Image (cartoon, helix red, strand yellow):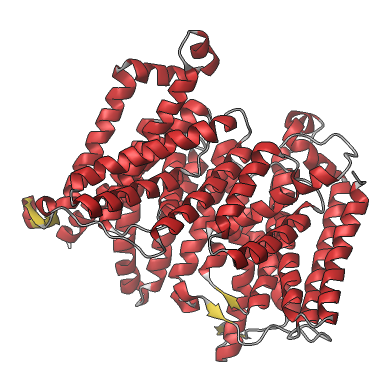
Amino acid sequence: MIPERWFTVGIWAGLLAFALVAHAIGEAYWVTLATRAAIFAIAGIGLNLALGNGGMISFGHAAYFGLGGYVVGILATHVQTYVPIYDGLFVLEGTQSMLVTWPLAVLVGGLAAFVVGGLCLRTDGAYFIMITLAFGQMFYYFAISWSAYGGEDGMSIYVRGGFPGVNTLAPLPFFGLSFAVLTVVLMLVHRINASPFGLALNAVPSAAARVETVGISTKRLKLAAFVISGMITALAGALFADLNRYVSPAMFSWTISGEIMIFVILGGVARLIGPVVGAIVFVTLEELLGGLSDFWHIYLGALLLLIVLFAKGGITGAVVRPARAVPDG
Amino acid sequence: MTLLILEQVLNGLQFGVMLFLMAAGLTLVFGVMGLINLAHGSLFMVGAFAAAAVAGATGSYALALIASAAAAAFAGVLIETLVIRRLYARDHLDQVLATFALILIFSEGTRMTFGSFPLYLDVPEMLAGPVSLPFGIQYPLFRLVLIGAGLAVAAALYLLVTRTRVGIQIQAGEADREMIAALGVNISVLYTLVFALGAGLAGLAGALVGTLQSVEVGMGEPVLITAFVVVVIGGIGSIQGALVGAILVGLVQTLGAFLLPIWSTAVFGSQDAGAILSSMLIYILMALVLLVRPKGLMGGAA
């Protein structure tokens, strides 16, 4: 049993050290795996804010992940074909600068989360889960039927987007960028958790009536958290598109929503570092078991089942000394 | 044009009754046990594969249909006693995660057993070919039989729930779980029974839909998610709501996919806008229902 703060810093530093060592011994593929884990972790942190802190069980976060990816993919496609996005009163060109594509991905993810969240928060409980799942599927079919942007085939990005002063094409600098984004997101969520907004949000799952009683609208609180959650997951999607240099409707599929949820659950719900642990474990399992058997998801399913039935706090919950009472769920 | 629309209405009805077979199980299980079951799509798939295997071995479509319902009901009893039973008292998050884990296990297990290539179920010769309807419509007999069979199952389910002892117990279970247990009904057996009933219906739907399309791993989840839309529109826990929702979704989806591209070609000169809009139509319908009646058209308390 170790204090949560040490564990958090240890995991953060461990991921960084792994990538640096892998680079030093010339294992570029391992650096890419660490990048993949960092990006999945960001997506998980986004979901954790809604699911862990706000108690909103969204089974549709693939929507924001996919939207983030599609913003990058669409902007890159216009660069590659030299066709402006809009050519009328003014000319709007595509771009591959991450300084533009990332904020735009975050913006689009936030807008979608605002609309979807606003509708879903009219209900709760099982309805909320089914509706988020259904809206996630809507984006999936939307992407499939949008033939102008690849339809079922998706879009290839010939060259990874650029960032000033960074050679994004090499594995280590791109890992560095992703890891920097992960760090910023972790710090942001840490600040949110300590802010009045975060404290009130954390109280919503266990004591919604009390939060209302002190004059805070739980609905607005939850919607705000849902929007921030969607924005963070969209940012992860944008990074994922740059990592793979390819986006497809598969980014919107319900299995992605399930996997993002697995990152959160494996690692530990409502823990800052939980999704990072979950993402690292997921990528490791994917690599180890995926190498052993084509059917590694069956083992993932068994592991998830065991964790849900017998180990509710996830990995972080098992390792970390409880600092405070953690509400159920 | 009118004839084509009439044909699409029939297609929509047929899609709707198949959705009802899925949604009925979901809504029953939620209503009685308070459980949200993502693995319902896996039971649909189990039914389809069982039918394909039995049809391949015996050549009998009737046996294949019986096998689909039986295999799915058996799989339902199996997962209910091993896993699902432990989830009734848990929160929805645990239920979603555990049943998601079951999907992974079922899908990969099926892929290991049957491989990744789709299987095909042939329409039985007796039901193959078109049939002439009034107004000169030529319509596939098999689809017509599906509509009839689906409506018959709906009627049988209605009679089962309202007219039989088990049905009354199911209704009582929806209203007050503790009380019915206190009155001496073996609640644990009742739960298993309800779950098996829902599973059997899903398996049957899997075999019937698998005959129209193909039988493959992952076939259940898109249907499951559409069935969720049905349940949300109809109201969770209401079988009548599931029927109304299923027919509504079936018609809107089918007619939208037929009419919107025609409309968009006429207005914009391209099918794209119509195709995109029609892919989103049932979700827009769901959003509208949520705006007006957040608990669904026929829903009470969730």
**Left or right, residue A154 beside residue B139:** right
Q: Is residue A97 above or below residue A35?
A: below
Looking at the image, which is closer to me, A92 or A298? Answer: A298
Q: Is residue A13 above or below residue A165?
A: above
Q: Is residue B259 above or below residue A156?
A: above
Looking at the image, which is closer to me, B100 or A249? Answer: B100
- Name the residue at 49% across, 33% down: B80
Q: Quadrant of residue B164?
A: top left
- Residue A11 appears at what percent x and percent y? 85, 59
- Residue B114 appears at what percent x and percent y? 39, 58
- Residue A206 appears at what percent x and percent y? 75, 32
Q: Is residue A173 visible?
A: yes
Looking at the image, which is closer to me, B81 or B255? Answer: B81
Q: Residue furthest top?
A: B183
**Left or right, residue A216 beside residue A72:** right
- Name the residue at 35% across, 41% down: B71
Looking at the image, which is closer to me, B282 or B132? Answer: B132
- Name the residue at 45% across, 58% down: B112
Q: Is residue A124 visible?
A: no
Q: Quadrant of residue A236?
A: bottom right
Looking at the rendered structure, the number of numbered marks drawn on it comes to 0
**Left or right, residue B249 beside residue B58:** right
Q: Quadrant of the N terminus of chain A?
A: top right
Q: Quadrant of the C terminus of chain A?
A: top right
- Name the residue at 41% across, 28% down: B194
Q: Is residue A112 above or below residue B134?
A: below
**Left or right, residue B84 beside residue B2:** right
Q: Quadrant of residue A10?
A: bottom right
Q: Residue furthest bottom?
A: A82
- Residue A209 appears at what percent x and percent y? 74, 29
